[in-house]
Image (cartoon, rainbow, N blue to C red):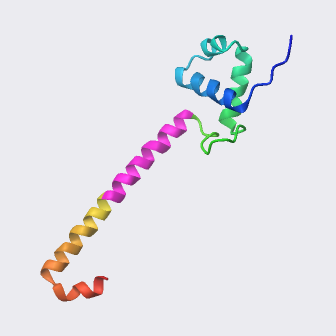
Amino acid sequence: MKRIRHSKDFKLQVVKEALETGNKAAVARRYEIAPNMLHRWTKEYEAGKFGDVSLEGISSLETKVLSQENDQLKKLLGEQALEIAILRDLIKKKNPHLLTKLK
């Protein structure tokens, strides 16, 4: 059997599709590669051996958790910025002479 070398882009595309669908065997049949090969590529992807993308070594579950945590932190930061703006407006209205100390 002839040995074929696949590019990293091809491997990455196939692995991402397999992870999205959750059916490695069907994806392997579609691209006419051995299921064991796809399984090995998936393990390499999760271990971060492809190295082209910054989140390569992170599994899809960890990516979802990080994304949720990131969204929570963005929301918290926005709330804090709003609270600071409201407090500054209150200080301006009640104590205009303190306005010079805030800057």
Residue farthest toward the left in the current orientation of the protein = 94
Query: Which residue appears at 59% of the width and 42% of the height?
Result: 55
Q: Is residue 41 rendered magenta in the image?
A: no
The spot of residue 2 in percent (x, y) is 86, 13
The spot of residue 16 in percent (x, y) is 59, 28
Q: Is residue 41 left or right of residue 61?
A: right
The spot of residue 71 in percent (x, y) is 40, 47
Above or below residue 13? Residue 85 is below
The spot of residue 7 in percent (x, y) is 74, 29
The secondary structure that dominates the magenta segment is helix
Q: Which residues are magenta?
A: 60-78
Above or below residue 56? Residue 74 is below
Above or below residue 19? Residue 65 is below
Query: Which residue appears at 29% of the width and 82% of the height?
Result: 102
Q: Is residue 70 rendered magenta in the image?
A: yes
Q: Quadrant of residue 32?
A: top right
Q: Is residue 87 left or right of residue 78?
A: left
In what quadrant of the picture does the C terminus appear? bottom left
In what quadrant of the picture does the N terminus appear? top right
Q: Quadrant of residue 78?
A: bottom left
Give the number of callouts: 0
Q: Quadrant of residue 46?
A: top right
Query: Which residue appears at 48% of the width and 41% of the height?
Result: 65
Query: Which residue appears at 35% of the width and 56% of the height?
Result: 76
